[in-house]
Amino acid sequence: MNKQELVTNVSQKVESTKKDADKFVTATLDAILETLGDQESIKLVGFGNWEIKKKAARVGRNPKTGEEVQIPEKMAVKFKPGKQMRNVVNGVVDEE
């Protein structure tokens, strides 16, 4: 699913125009990016959690030449799916 397909899906679910749904989707994605850019976690119960983790500098190898290469420290986004998402993906029916 790409962004336009998501916008269409959202517009149908909330019974609004695609233009309004695009605003909702764009605002949501912008809020997620802004929060992660501020090095903050996002926790959406049932859906999942995004966290920012620091990856330490390390030595790697160029696979073509075998030469050692210094890989600098960087920040990475980690996503851990929530229980509801795992159940949907695995086809598990929640018995509540």
Image (cartoon, rainbow, N blue to C red):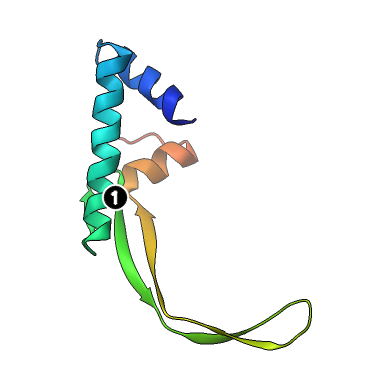
What x and y, as percent, mark residue 92?
Answer: 43, 38
Q: Is residue 79 visible?
A: yes
Q: Which of 87 and 42 is in front in this view?
A: 42
Q: In this view, does 28 lie to the left or right of 76?
A: left
Q: Name which residue lies at 27% across and 59% down.
A: 37
Instruction: Estimate the x, y position of residue 61 in percent, counting from the top left.
Output: 67, 83
Identify whether 86 is placed above or below 91. Answer: below
Q: What element carries label 1?
A: helix
Percent of width and height locating residue 80:
36, 56
Q: Quadrant of residue 69?
A: bottom right
User: Is residue 13 something one can see in this rendering?
Assistant: no
Q: In this view, does 68 lie to the left or right of 87?
A: right
Residue drawn at x 43%, y 24% as measured from the top left: 4
Query: Which residue lies under the disc numbered 1?
Result: 33
Q: Give the answer, above or below, for where 19 lies relative to 36.
A: above
86 is higher (above) or lower (below) than 41: above
Asked whether, in this view, residue 42 is left or right of residue 56, the answer is left
- Percent of width and height locating residue 96: 25, 34
Q: Closer to the camera, 37 or 93? A: 37
Q: What residue type is labelled 1?
A: Leu
Classify 10 Å Cα crowding around label 1: few (below 14), some (14-19), many (20 and above): few
